[in-house]
Image (cartoon, rainbow, N blue to C red):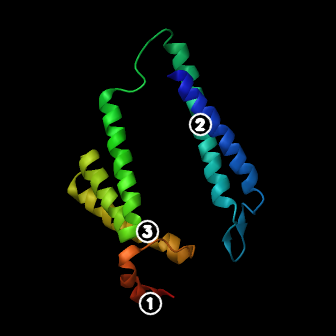
Amino acid sequence: MRVAELTVAALLMALSGYFMFHATALPIGWQEGAGPGGGAFPFWLSLIMLLAAGGIFLRHFAEALADRGSRRPFITRAALRDVLIVVLSLLAAIALIHVVGAYVAIPLFLLFYLRVMGNCGWRLTATLTLVTPVVVFLFFEVALKILLPKGITEPLFIPLYALLF
């Protein structure tokens, strides 16, 4: 399994380099009066992905030095079950975005993930579930002027848009 892990890390690093190279076709710095350049988010997110994949290599070599010859499984059944639950819940959230919009799908996913998967208390779950869509709205729609899908909830945003714009 280590070969597969390192192969995926190498592919992610190559893909990150490719994305970074093409992102530099657009400005990646701050544009006065306009905000971040068109290539900023792709470039910096690709750099983070490159560093994370590089961390996989570093971890592999550190573990190889400390753990020669061990045949531990790559993932346990319990961990695989948790990963599958998260993947399926993310797919459900993505499917819901087109129906009920991002501002309903995101809190529903957070509610499930924090309460069911994370066993977090109701206070933390409610706080993050209610605050996150507000912050996402202010960041994307107000600050960056990027409209997110709203699905059937779009009429609820018309008075808010009239107030803010």
Circle 3 sits in a helix, a strand or a loop, which is it? helix
Residue at the spot of label 2:
53
Q: Residues within 10 Å of mark 3 (few under 14, many from 20)?
A: few
Residue 69 appears anywhere in the view: yes
Residue at the spot of label 3:
135
The one nearer the camera, 30 or 50, is 50
Residue 163 circle label: 1
Q: Position of residue 44 (x, y in %)?
A: 64, 53
Q: Position of residue 143 (x, y in %)?
A: 55, 74
Q: Residue at x 25, y 52 (%)?
A: 115
Q: Position of residue 16 (x, y in %)?
A: 66, 44
Disc 2 or 1, which lies upstream in sequence? Answer: 2
Disc 2 or 3, which lies upstream in sequence? Answer: 2
Disc 3 or 1, which lies upstream in sequence? Answer: 3
C-alpha separation, residue under disc 2 versus residue under disc 3: 29 Å
Circle 1 sits in a helix, a strand or a loop, which is it? helix
Give above or below for 99 relative to 8: below
Amino acid bearing label 3: Val
